[in-house]
Amino acid sequence: MRKIAVVTGTRAEYGLLEPILRLIEADKSLRLQLIVTGAHLSNRFGRTVREIEGDGFRPAAKVPLGLSGDGPADIAAAMGRGLKGFAAAFTRLKPDLLVLLGDRYEILAAAAAALPFRLPVAHIHGGESSEGAWDESVRHAVTKLSHVHFPAAAAYARRLRQLGEDPLRIHCFGSPGLDRLRSLDRLSRVELARELGLPLKRPLGVVTYHPATLAADRGLGELDALLGALKSFEGTLIFTYPNADVGGKAVLAKIRAFTAADPRHRAAFASLGQRRYFSLLRHADVMAGNSSSGLLEAPYFGLPAVNVGDRQKGRLRLGNVIDVPRPTAARIRRALRSALRRVRRPLAAAGISPSRRIVSAMKRLRLDDKLLSKRFHEVRGA
């Protein structure tokens, strides 16, 4: 039986991985070893490991990072604790393959820890770009530490080849998160209002803003512009908490102060859970902030997204996104008005499951020395 270890550290990444976890668990030739870390184990971020367990998954290991602060030294120390914790987990679990998704610092720690174990790594959502955050560097570093790749789009697969990855190691099947969006039972507007404890007066806006970790002020100036624009928003605003990144506490403090000023029409949640979050995207009239969710999940619902600043610069966009690269309150207000006038055009559901194709490819992998021994693939004409 092939043992496949999968690492999850945030609510967003878990939502993308969940269909893959289900398929691994259901396959009699595979054994799922779920390793939970990061914000999932933090009370400050909603301790979302309870949601994972509520979905029926039993973590094989938990790797706490001790996320007490959000300064550069705190995050670097958390990475060190992660490196040690993943090493202990790999020693005990002895997985045959490690599956990682995305670009978080805890994912980099897991990839680095796998190296001396000769543990092959499969990386999902590589080759993407987010030039306004140091996630960009993390993502490409994980690519070089990985042995097989599952990018979400052809343009991202091309970037992997530019990074020297052998095309035979690259399998472009799309984002596994699409399977989750298709299958999840969503709440009605009345049910969602009851669970959130707000009337959900229209227009309904969802706001997710994370620190811009490469900016000198961590994006606080752009957040001030966003909140300034939202002061005149006449409907209901639902905020989700920022990531556990450098500068996250300052971002959260501003969001809390803003929502406290009008608690009848504004609220912030550490974690909505997958069902409530996707139900919110279904019923919302506009999304705003700098989260990749505006570019990845919002298009599925046809939800217009106002993308503030450069955090997501470099990612592929669909027609639902309105970019405000040099944000001021006035520019963001104009973008919001434009977004609210748009006609929603949800994406047509594709018939082929990316998650099923990814798991099938993992089953076919030859886990041998040839897989572990990587040669830099030269791109002709480069």
Image (spheres, rainbow, N blue to C red):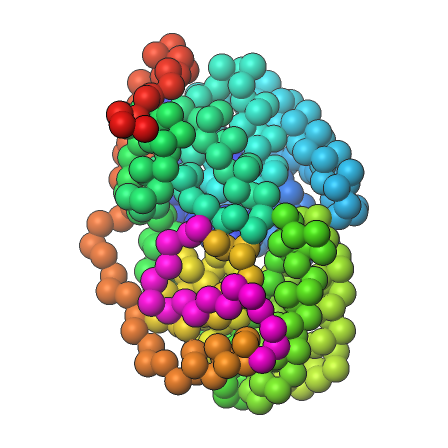
Number of numbered callouts drawn: 0
- The quadrant of the picture occupied by the N terminus is top left
Instruction: Judge whether residue 22 can be spotted in this image.
Output: no
Q: At 65% from the left edge and 52% from the top edge, which residue is drawn?
A: 215
**Camera-side residue: 156 or 29?**
156
Q: Give the residue at x 56% y 14%.
A: 116
Q: Nearer the viewer, residue 213 or 115?
A: 213
Q: Is residue 378 visible?
A: yes
Image spot of residue 295 (x, y percent): 42, 60
Left or right: 118 in relation to 75:
left
Q: Residue at x 36, y 37 (%)?
A: 159
Q: Position of residue 193 (x, y in %)?
A: 54, 80
Which region shows up in magenta?
314-330
Q: Residue furthest front?
A: 381
- Spot occupied by residue 298 in the image (x, y as percentages of width and height): 41, 65
Would you place residue 359 above or below residue 68 in this image?
above
Q: Main secondary structure of the magenta part?
A: loop
Left or right of 327: which side holds 74? Answer: right
Q: Residue furthest left?
A: 351
Q: Position of residue 43 (x, y in %)?
A: 72, 53
Residue located farthest toward the top when viewing the structure as drawn: 369
Residue at image location 42% in from the left, 44% down from the top: 128
200 vs 295: above or below: below
Looking at the rendering, which quadrant does residue 31 occupy?
A: top left
Closest to the observer, 78 or 92: 78
Q: Is residue 218 above or below residue 379?
A: below
Residue 14: within the magenta?
no
Query: Which corner quadrant of the image does residue 219 belong to?
Result: bottom right
Q: Quadrant of the C terminus?
A: top left
Residue 323 magenta: yes
